[in-house]
Image (cartoon, grey):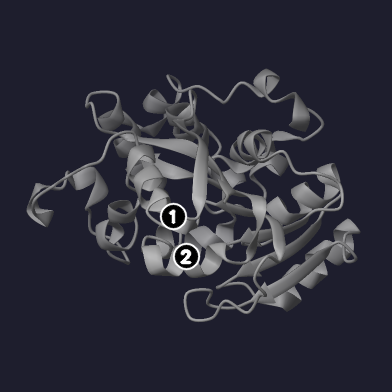
Amino acid sequence: MDINDYLKNYKNVNIHKYPEIAEYHRYQIYEQFIGCGGLFLATKMVREMNPKKGDIVLDLGCGLGTSSIFLAKHFDVTVVAVDFWNSPQQLVKRITQEGYLNRIVPMQLDITREVPFDENCFDAIFCMNSLFMFGGEVPFLQKLLKTLKPGGVFCVGSECFNKEPNYSDKSEVPKVYNFDYNWDVWDECFSKYHSPAWWQVLLTQTNQLDIKYCKENDDGLTMWEDIALNYYDYFSNGAIEMGAIIPLENIIDIIEYAKKHSIHVTTFVLSAIRK
């Protein structure tokens, strides 16, 4: 079977389940995102986060600012948009064009080395498709969570495995997650996904959060099919050419593997309240 034979059996995410973003064209739902889910995932997150007008929200791992603009536009909040890879100049240009320069404060920093915010600073922390890359250690999370006000919301949405893949050795890892590429896709990406249950245990161990919601999304695997169907709308040519995005044929392999095995990729949302 060629790529098109697989794609014709895939589903798009049902936009009618997301009335909050009904005004968006499909390409806008994916615009400038790197990870899975786009504004579909962001919408699921804010449903659990419930941001309020006037809140100060840390958008951690904001990428090129689509999630920050979404938060500022729909919820009238002030967003501190932090990213490791993208410069403030890039973000300033975009948010100026979008008309949100007065609502979004862009910053570029390595949050694992420096948390430059006061304690009890934020009403919410929104972390989409990024925490797995840098936030898998309790000491770091404890330091980060101190910036959240008591009663504030910590919300994570991300790619994940539906169950924890406890491979005893890298040689046991299925090839779909451990293939030859420009970078080590298992060590640098898939090995860090974990499961919703794993993330709930880790965040509970900080002793700073009450977990209110932690579930795999009911259309989590469909979000992966959606990536495949809209690959060239979802990801910019620059990101693809740089090798930041794994090839479409590998995404298809991952989806096909998921259909046949009990442990597979999906997405999840976790929401917690700072004690």
Amino acid under label 1? Asn
* Mark linked to residue 207: 1
Q: Residue at x 21, y 42 (%)?
A: 165
- Quarter-wise, where is residue 8 in the image? top left
Q: Nearer the viewer, residue 89 or 227?
A: 89
Viewer-proximal residue among 80 and 254: 80
Q: On screen, 228 above or below 102?
A: above
Residue 94: image location, x then y, percent: 79, 64
Cβ–Cβ under 8 Å for marks 1 and 2: yes
User: Within the image, what quadrant is residue 86 found in?
Assistant: bottom right
Q: Can residue 150 be seen in this snapshot?
A: yes
Q: Could you tell me which secondary element the residue under label 2 belongs to?
A: helix
- In the picture provided, is 58 more to the left or to the right than 251? right
> Would residue 212 be found to the left or right of residue 192 on screen?
right
Q: Camera-side residue: 215 or 29?
A: 215
Q: Residue sitting at 59 percent across and 38 percent down?
A: 41
Q: Earlier in the sequence, mark 1 or mark 2?
A: 2
Q: Amino acid at mark 2?
A: Gln
Q: Residues within 10 Å of mark 2 (few under 14, many from 20)?
A: some
Quadrant where the N terminus sits is: top left
The front one of 86 and 55 is 55
Q: Residue sitting at 56 percent across and 37 percent down?
A: 230
Q: Residue 88 lies in what quarter of the image?
A: bottom right
Task: Identify residue for label 2.
Answer: 142
Residue 130, labelled with which disc? Answer: none
As helix, strand or loop, the secondary structure at mark 1 comes to: loop
Residue 36 seen in this snapshot = no
Q: Horizontally, is 85 left or right of 58 in the view?
A: left
Q: Position of residue 74 (x, y in %)?
A: 83, 42
Placement of 168 over or under 121, stated as above or below: above
Rendered position, 99 above or below 270: below
User: Exactly how many numbered labels are in the figure?
Assistant: 2
